[in-house]
Amino acid sequence: MSSLMTNRDHPKRKWLVLTIVAMTQLVVVLDGTIVSIALPQAQIQLGMSDVQRQWVVTAYALAFGSLLLLGGRIADFWGRKRTYILGLVGFGAASAYGGLIHTGAELVLARGLQGIFAALMAPAALAILTITFPHGRERNTAFAIFGAIAGMGAAIGLLMGGVLTEYASWRGCLLVNVPIVITVAIAAAYLLNESKAHGDTKLDILGAVLVTAGLGSLVYGFTLAEKGWDRASVWAFLALAVALLIGFFVWQSRSRHPLLPLRILNRTRGGAFLLQMVAGATMVGAMLYLTFHMQIVLGFSPLHTGLAMVVQTVAISATAPVVTKLLPRFGPRPFLIAGPLIAASAMVFLSRVTVGGSYWTEIMPALIVNGVGMALLFVPVQNLALLGVDPHDAGAASATGNASNQIGASVGLAVFTTIYAEVTSGSHNPADLVSGYHSVFHSSAVVLALGALIAFTMIRGTKSQLMPGMEHKR
C-alpha cells in the first residue's frame, strides 16, 4: 500500500493535510445549510411549490447520504487522493450548474448532483485524515478540530447564505463553491500522495443498490406523508424501505466484498453513528424552520437572518477548545450525554416563539445554548466513529459516519416537514405557521433526548479505551 506522505517525516505537512480535509468538511456541511436562507427568494423567483422547496435541501442530503458507503469503498479501492479530487471537481461543476439554472426542477437536480460528488469527496477526505493521524494525542487533536469545524459549518452556511442572498442573489450560495473547490483541489494535488486499501478490492454493487433504494424509499415515504398518513402510497414506500434495508444488512453479512463491513459496527462506533444522525436531523431540519420563522413571520431579511445565526457559531467556536482540553480528563462519554440534553433544552426554549416576539429574548438565548450543546457533541463524536478502524476499512467507516449525519438530515427534515404540514394544514396565517414551528422544535427536543439515551447506553469503556494516547497528565 502506498504512503500518504504524512507521518513523522513531514510533521508540518500533515497539519496542512488537516487544513485541506477541514476545508472539505466545511464545504460539505456548509452546503447543507447555505441554501436554506436563500430558499424563500429562490422559491419566488423560480415559482417552486413548498414540496419542491423542501426537496432542494432533501435532494442534497439524500443523494449524499445514500451514496456515501459506495463512495467510501471507491475511495479505498480506486485511490483516496484520486477519488477526493474527482469529487471536488464534480462538486464544483454541479455548483456552477446550480447557480445558472432557471427552473425549480433544475435546482433540485443540481443539488442532487452536488450530493453525488460530495459522496465521493467526503469519505475520501476523512479516510485521508484517519491514515494521516493513525493514533495518539495528535490524532485526537486533529479529530477535535475536524469535529468543531463540522459543527460550525452548518451555522456558517446560514450566515453566508444570508450575506450572499442579500447582496448578490440566491445563486451566489451555489456559485461561491467554485473558487473554494478550485483552491482546495490545487492544494490537494500538490500536498497529497495516493493511498489505497490492500487485499480484496471489488465493489459491492448490489449492496449499493439496496441501501440507496432503501434510504430513498424511506425519505420519499415520509415526504408523501405530508399530505396525510392515510394514503396507501405512504405505507407502501415505508414498507419497501424497511424490506430493502433489511435485505441490505442480510446481504452485507454474506457478501465477500461488503459495502459496509459489519465488523466496523461495534457498540461504540454504532452509538457514534446514531449520534451523528441525531445531530444531522437537528442542525439541518430544526434550524431550517427557525430561518423560516425569522424571515416569513418576523420579517427578517436574508442578511439579518444570517447574522442572527452567528451567535450559534460563536458559541460552538468558544466551546470547542474548552471541550478539547477537558476530554483527556473526563473522556468523551459525559460530553456525548450532556451535549444532546443541553441542545434539547434549547429546542424546548425555541418552542415558545411567538408571532410578534423578540429575537433577543426568544431566539438568541436558545441559539447560544444549542451551540454549546452541539460543540460538546461534535468534538468527540467523529473520533469515536473511527476509533480502532483498520486502514483497509477507513473509507467505509468514514463514509458510514458521514452517511449517518446526512441521512439524519434528510429523514429528520422529511419527518419534521410532515409534522409541520399536519399542524398548519396548508395555512399561511402567521399564528398557524408558528404553531407548526412549535411542533418541529418539540420534535427536535425529543430526538435530542433520545441521542443522550443512546450515548448513555452505547458509549462504554474507560478513558484510555475511548481515547487512546490521550490519558490525562496531572
Image (cartoon, rainbow, N blue to C red):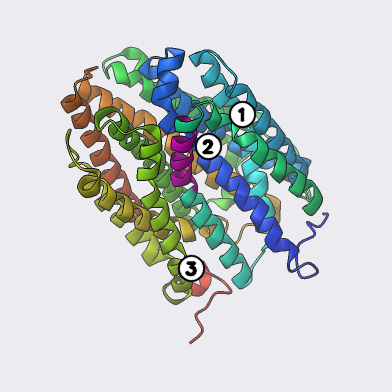
Residue 238 seen: no
Q: CA distance from mark 3 to mark 2?
A: 26 Å
- Residue 235, compared with residue 450, is above or below; it is above
User: Does residue 355 show up magenta in the picture?
Assistant: no
Depth check: give the residue in front, 105 or 470: 105
Q: Where is residue 148 shown, x and y percent of the image? A: 49, 57
Left or right of 264: which side holds 10? Answer: right
Give the mark nearest the N terminus, 3 or 1.
1
Q: Where is residue 265 shown, x and y percent of the image? A: 53, 51
Q: What residue do we see at 53% from left, 62% from top?
A: 144
Check disc 1 and report the residue beneath it: 95
Check disc 3 and report the residue beneath it: 324
Check disc 2 and report the residue beneath it: 31
Q: Amino acid at mark 2?
A: Asp
Viewer-nearest of discs 3 and 2: 2
Cβ–Cβ below 8 Å for labels 1 and 2?
yes
- Residue 112, compared with residue 370, is above or below; it is above
Res 117 → quadrant: top right
Q: Residues within 10 Å of mark 2 (few under 14, many from 20)?
A: many
